[in-house]
Amino acid sequence: MSRGRQFRDLLGRGVLTIAPGAYDCITARSIVQAGFGAVYMTGAGTAATLGYPDYGLLTMSEMADNAGRIAAAVDVPVIADADTGYGNELNATRTVREYERRGVAGLHIEDQGFPKKCGHLDNKAIVPLDEYLAKIRAAVAAKRDPDFFIIARTDSRAMLGFEEAVRRANAALAVGADMAFVEAPQTVEEVAAVPRLVKGPCLLNVVWHGKTPGFRSGRPKRMGYRVAIVPGLLFKSVIGVCDAMLSELRTTDRHPVPMHSMTVGEAFRRVGADEWDAVSDRFGVAKPPPAEAAE
């Protein structure tokens, strides 16, 4: 079963799919080990791992490679940020093929211009609707696996208003996108209105202290959302933990007690040591028993 088919089956269960954001294989595995059925590759977190803010500074291949590493590390579907598709309809075509080839279940492409920014920052540039739809059409046509999932994201709420964001979401669905992602609705009323006004499945982006009000997980489902991504939870939490541990080390000159105080072996098991030990047990050369001590 392809990862795209796996993701579609997950959505078919009729429950809200919550996909926390991973920026590397450690965070992706942690999400799966916590019991979540899908992983979201955060573009902001991916940019941060290379030392950049979420200002569109990463290339398509850098993003696709990270998505592929994450997808290979887990056995649940991964949906991934693909920014603007990295250019026009030609670039969007190659983007879909590269992400799909790396085992990703789906991606989202947005209608920002350059330089693109995190959807919860100000002063974003929005491309004309016909330019955006050309990329969505091309992305849909580029799929080799019919189950690969195309999510159409619009960032137009901030610059062009809520009605235009809804119009663009519906237009993208009409040309073949599988799901709409209206970024950063600004009130509870707007968040609730998106699934009513958009004629297809909707994704909600949950960002702590972002432009969109926060919700308990059950409420977006009751509003009609099918997927909720939580992109910054682990990325920002890790920064906070690092700050606390390093501050304690600097001020005490002692090794701080890690938050979960796991042993070396436990840490390696979290990233797959048991699987690799099983390979050694099955295929490794048997060691001879120790020779008896001479009398």
Image: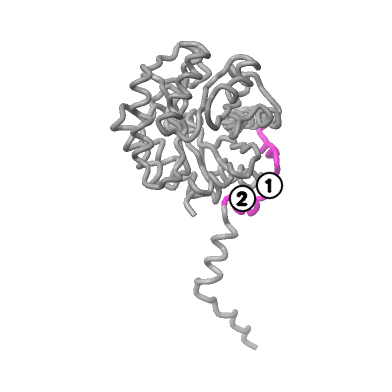
Amino acid type of the residue tagged 1 in the rendering: Met
Q: Is residue 214 above or below residue 35?
A: above
**What is the CA distance from the residue labelled 1 to the residue labelled 2?**
10 Å
Quarter of the rendering occupied by the C terminus: bottom right
Residue drawn where x is 70% and y is 38% of the image: 259
Which of 45 and 67 lies nearest the eye of the viewer? Answer: 67
The answer to which image quadrant residue 94 occupies is top left
Drawn side of residue 60 relative to residue 277, left or right: left
Drawn side of residue 175 relative to residue 286, left or right: left
Of helix, strand and loop, which one carries label 1?
loop
Which of 256 and 198 lies nearest the eye of the viewer? Answer: 198
Drawn side of residue 45 relative to residue 101, left or right: right
Of helix, strand and loop, which one carries label 2?
helix
- The residue that disc 2 covers is 270
Residue drawn where x is 56% and y is 40% of the image: 39
Drawn side of residue 294 relative to residue 84, left or right: right
Residue drawn where x is 59% and y is 36% of the image: 20
Which of 292 and 217 lies nearest the eye of the viewer? Answer: 217
The image shows residue 38 at horizontal and vertical percentages of 57, 42
Residue 55 numbered mark, or none: none
Q: Is residue 18 above or below residue 123?
A: below
The image shows residue 280 at horizontal and vertical percentages of 53, 67
Residue drawn where x is 59% and y is 37% of the image: 19
Label 2 Cα crowd, 10 Å radius (few <14 / some 14-19 / many 20+): few
Q: Are marks 1 and 2 in contact (CB under 8 Å)?
A: yes
- The residue that disc 1 covers is 262
Q: Which residues are magenta?
A: 250-271
Q: Residue furthest bottom?
A: 295
So how many labels did they put on this image? 2
Q: Is residue 258 magenta?
A: yes
